Amino acid sequence: MITYRLLRYGLCMGWVMAALASVRAGAPAVLPESGARRVIHVGTEHAVYDLYVGPDSRLYNLRFGSQEIPALQTEGSGGGSLTEAYPPSGTRYAFEPALSIIHADGNNSTDLEFVGEQAGSPSPGVKETRIKLRDPVYPVDVELVFRAYAGFDVIEQSSEIRHTEPGAIVLERFASSSPQMTGDLWLTQFHGDWANEMNPLSERLSPGIKVLDSKTLVRADRFRPPFFLLGVGAAVREAAGETWAGMLDWSGSFQFAFDDNGLGATRLLAGINPYGQAYRLDPGVLFATPVMRWAWSDQGVGQLSRNLHRWIRRYALRDGDRPRAVLLNNWEATGFAFDEGKIVSLFDRAKDLGMELFLLDDGWFGTRFPRNDDTQGLGDWSVNPAKLPRGISHLADEARNRGLRFGIWIEPEMVNPRSELYLAHPDWVIREPGRALELQRNQLVLDLTRPAVAQYESGVIDTLLRDNPGVSYVKWDSNRYVTQPGSSWLPKDRQSNLGIDYVRALDGLMAEVEKRHPAVEMMLCSGGGGRVDLGTLKHFDEFWPSDNTDPLRRVVMQWDYSTFFPALAISGHVTHSGGRSIKFALDVAMSARMGIDLDLSKLTPEESRQAAVAVEVYKDKLRDVVQFGDLYRMESPHSGPRSVIDYVSQDKSRAAMFVFQVADGAPDAVRPGGLDPQAKYRLSELDLGEGGVPAMPQLGSVISGTDLAATGIIPTVHKAISSQVVWLERVD
């Protein structure tokens, strides 16, 4: 690796220095007539992403990861064109392009030549590189924007497209990123549906195109989230092997296309799904694609996850350094059937258990069409006086009097046909003329591309939070995706702009709420895990992973979500779903951002005791380690009778090991990861009182990190649907 780096940094330095002034001034690069290459490094020290400018003034892929891309070409391709870094359509390229344009005069071909590059550092440890490309015939400019994060091995890429043609052009394809890799590649994708999210599937990529996509325009993660893993040489492994993760910052329809050309390389095309979204772009208007994020590790997916978790907490998650509160939600206790007295009674029980935050869910609004079920009221964000005669502020005051913060549920993007809003503004919804209304969950999507709608939604949220200053938490839901994608606001020739403009307007709305109400914590929800993406999560503190709260299913889901997201972003709630023991449900919730969604008045005395102890233990010991520690996934629930995860504090002084027995069995000892081999640790169990489980033989022992890594810890839970939480604390 050292020899390679010395070589690549020394390439062509003589002519590079001579051409540098003119390139940075925006003039075309003066390239040698020989086969020399100007190499541009846009990655980190370890996560290599190298491009080069060829003698033909075009930009090519050189290396993405450990292996260099061969200079591929076919007959008549012009030499090396199959490795263009951002290949346009209609000129030389014979495979799936990154950019396809219909020009104002109807021409379908585009060419891109290198103009120049600019490098800088927008913040410490972050390197930004901008590479400008230009069509030599048409006034079309494309700027490739890269950001590399030292210490995290994370690389971002997006594209910016501008033109000054005499009329609008149509963008038919507009990838955010299109690197290439060579070698044997294994893809791990995730798929599912409502209440069954995040099912992993691994397969070896072969010649042809493998496409993962979404076509739902809104809450686009419903069936497939916008992230994946790639293993180089083998399927991804936890603690070994070169591994890439790809994540797109977009909550609309997306597409990942893995184009194996059969000639020795696979192109990774990532970005907005072009299906039904050909974009009409006026002269002088910037079209910026969403950021595609690449994360790399040569020590398997475990190290990749730890890097990503730290990066997300620092750069991509709202208030990523702030501990998350222990929350009580009323939904499982009451559904829509509640009144002021019932909600206040839940406060008292929450206080007794040591909870910190209460969330009032759906059903608090609507006057003419009261929200007593999901058939009406959505869109009318005034308090239902029959349920809450003294309003939201009274509830918030009552919660505060008991030492609780107060939160509320909203679904601002949606409307029921049975609502005052829809009756007043039937043209505000997304639909196509001449067709009968098509409902999902009895509701429609409001057209955010219409300025009046965006202004209305902003005003609703702003008024709610301004008039009720005691509200310090909001659960933002979204319970349907788009069908009949038509807008009565957009012109006829701009209807296919709808999906992209909607997501941009939604992002603007969320950013505005975040800016105006910085102290209000926000949960991102979408009928479960229908909107789990960094494009929206940057405005939120956490996300709701699934409406399936069976703790046995959550063990598996949380394992897979943790591949990409840190624990403080994953909402885990205790419910009676699945009929599991409360100890098992509490342990599962404590391995994420803990919450409870139960009618506390119906718990047995022993269940109440266990819940109170769990809340105390989580706040006093576990929260800091789980939410801000490094995660080591030790045993997968996909491949054995138990799941074991280990959170280790940043200074390695404390660790929490969660053992979830998902099937009967008595496996071997567990060797915890991440401990200081030179330190000594005292072992204890955070026992919440479930009987019938013998004490661990090492309980109370002081053992070195070296010995723990060699001999491990012996759990004593062997029956299905049982659990243990082992606490390790360094002894000085």
Image (cartoon, rainbow, N blue to C red):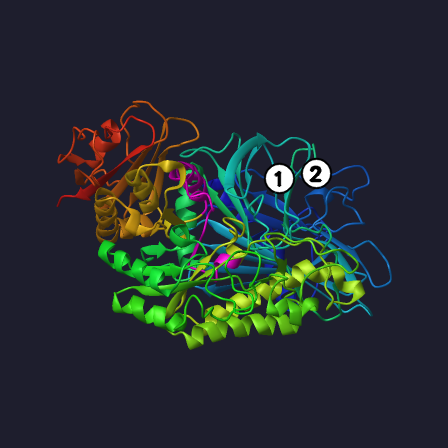
Residue depicted at 30% across the width and 43% down the height: 586
Q: Is residue 305 magenta?
A: no
Residue depicted at 65% across the width and 69% down the height: 423
**Residue situated in front as seen by the camera: 408 or 621:** 408
Amino acid type of the residue that numbered disc 2 sits on in the rendered structure: Leu
Where residue 354 sits, quadrant-wise, is bottom left
Q: Look at the numbered discs 1 and 2 and tell me whether their residues touch, using CB distance below 8 Å.
A: yes
Residue 564 in the image: above or below residue 391: above
Give coordinates of residue 590: x percent, y percent.
31, 46
Relative placement, left or right, of 280 versus 366 is right
Considering the numbered disc 2 on the image, is that residue within a helix, a strand or a loop?
A: loop
Give coordinates of residue 200: x percent, y percent.
51, 36
Give coordinates of residue 613: x percent, y percent.
21, 47
Let me know if residue 136 appears in the view. Answer: yes
Residue depicted at 35% across the width and 61% down the height: 343
Residue 516 in the image: above or below residue 33: below
Relative placement, left or right, of 465 versus 490 is left
Residue 72's disc number: 2
Relative placement, left or right, of 69 versus 388 is right
Residue 48's disc number: none
**Residue situated in front as seen by the camera: 362 or 404:** 362
Residue 288 in the image: above or below residue 696: below
The span shown in magenta is 536-564
Which residue corresponds to mark 1? Answer: 69
Amino acid type of the residue that numbered disc 1 sits on in the rendered structure: Ile
Count how many numbered circles sit on residues in the image: 2
Residue 313 in the image: above or below residue 62: below
Q: Is residue 552 magenta?
A: yes
**Residue situated in front as seen by the camera: 471 or 658:** 471
